[in-house]
Amino acid sequence: MTPTTDRTRAPVHVIRLLIVGFAAATLGSALRAGNQTYDPEYITILHGQESRYSSDIEGFERDRGRWNVEAQLAEAHHHRGLVRDKLRNYRGWLEDEEAAIRIDPSRPWYYWGRGNARSWLDDYEGQVADFEIALAKAVVATPSEAADYRNRLRDARRDLTFNVEERDHKTAHASWKAGRDKQEKGDHAAAAVDFTLAIAADPLWAIPHHERGFSRLRFGDLRGAAEDAANAVRLDPSRSELHYIYADALGRTGRLEERLLELQKSVECAEAEYLADDYARYAKELAEVYHAVAEPVLAVKRDHPDAHAAYALGLAEYAAGHYENSLRAHTRALELFPGFARCRERLALEQAELPFNLQRRDQPDAYASFAYGREREAAGQFTEAVDSYRWATDFDPTWLPAHEARLRAATAAQPQTAVLVQVRLTELDAIISLQEKSGAPAVEIARRRAERAALTPAR
């Protein structure tokens, strides 16, 4: 009888697996009964168990072509994973359970183990998914244990929402704290990147929106600052400071009418919060803005009511996201009263903002990617900005500012690799094509062609 044909004789590490497995289970029970007291002697024992399982796994791997040891190999991975659980090596535990599942996907307890490992790694959605598989397998393989699997799946589902919210807020808080540290050092562009991560983890938390808007103001992204401040007051409309920062951002972007309204809200909230100093400061600024903006407009309302009505209609259309209608209404107001200075300023502002407003409304994914690229670029992370701008151009290949931004970031990135040079060539081709279709000035198209020719190697 040769080893290649006899698949019934168990190798020595199979016998040792049974002994070590029993010992590990006993030690694990003692540990959990003792409230997981990790004394040095016990840690040494656990490391010894882990080492022996590793040795067994190596032996089974060698024997796979000669002996039928698939089940034993899977069990060795599973038991080593349980030991790693005691050692709080949850990533290693997860890897062992995944190895066991690949070898023998029929055992419900492997999925159960992987689900528990995932929960320690904050993957609560994965935990529930694995518990569901474990229950389905248990119904077939071990019906007597199905009730226990069902109860534990029920508990995991019950706790899922709370666990996910707690995990996401913990992640968001860590990113927010990193951003605040960078703010205090004056690195507002890098801080904005951290606040973006905080928002991604917990989008309903107003403070990261507020802080990112503050940082964007400091490095000159006025449009982005206004958007962040708007989100902050939407999520937490009772805080006077958020309304005041929003008013500041609106004023810097030229939207004086909206600034007036937000200042009024900041005054009202400060009064409700019993913030006497803030109330006095906000009220003083409100009076100044009212005198500069509202009083001239009220004079137009008195002397040219039709022009004022068209102007007010334009503001309402703009607030509703009907940007083209707003332009038409303000154009009509100027036709009715050419001397309407504030309306002329507002019309010029909206014309300049129209491409971005339409993009934000009609292509929100492209706009979000573009905004993230701007943050990366402002933080000096040019290679990352190139990737973000690529998403914007993928979502909307006809958006010229996104192609120009990607070209700019690829040009600034160092060192200039062959990949970056190819990105520049690709973006220049796209820019030239879009300029030709839009009827851009010939001198601008010629400039882009010359820029491309300088990048093309001589043949």
Image: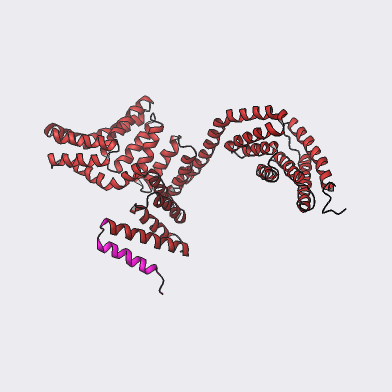
| Outermost residue to the right | 1
All told, the count of numbered labels is: 0
Residue toward you, 28 or 222: 28
Q: Position of residue 347 (x, y in %)?
A: 22, 43
- The answer to which of 354 and 207 lies nearer the viewer is 354
How is this picture coloured? secondary structure
Q: Is residue 36 left or right of residue 337?
A: right
In the depicted view, which residue is nearer to us: 79 or 286? 79
Image quadrant for the C terminus?
bottom left
Magenta-colored span: 438-459
Is 50 left or right of 242, judged from the image as shown? right
Residue shown at 29% from the left, 33% from the top: 261
Q: Residue furthest left?
A: 303
Q: Magenta includes 139? A: no
* Figure quadrant of residue 142: top right
Residue at the (84%, 46%) spot, across then down: 8
Question: Could you tell me what secondary structure mostly forms the magenta stretch?
Answer: helix
Q: Is residue 185 left or right of residue 444?
A: right
Camera sees residue 288: no
Point 58% across, 30% down: residue: 157
| Residue 363, position as x, y percentages in the image | 36, 44
443 part of magenta stretch? yes
Q: Position of residue 401 (x, y in %)?
A: 34, 53
Q: Is residue 219 above or below residue 316?
A: below
Q: Position of residue 73 (x, y in %)?
A: 75, 46
Horizontal placement of 228 versus 149: left or right? left
Residue at 35% from the left image edge and 26% from the top image edge: 271
- Residue 381 visible in the current orientation: yes
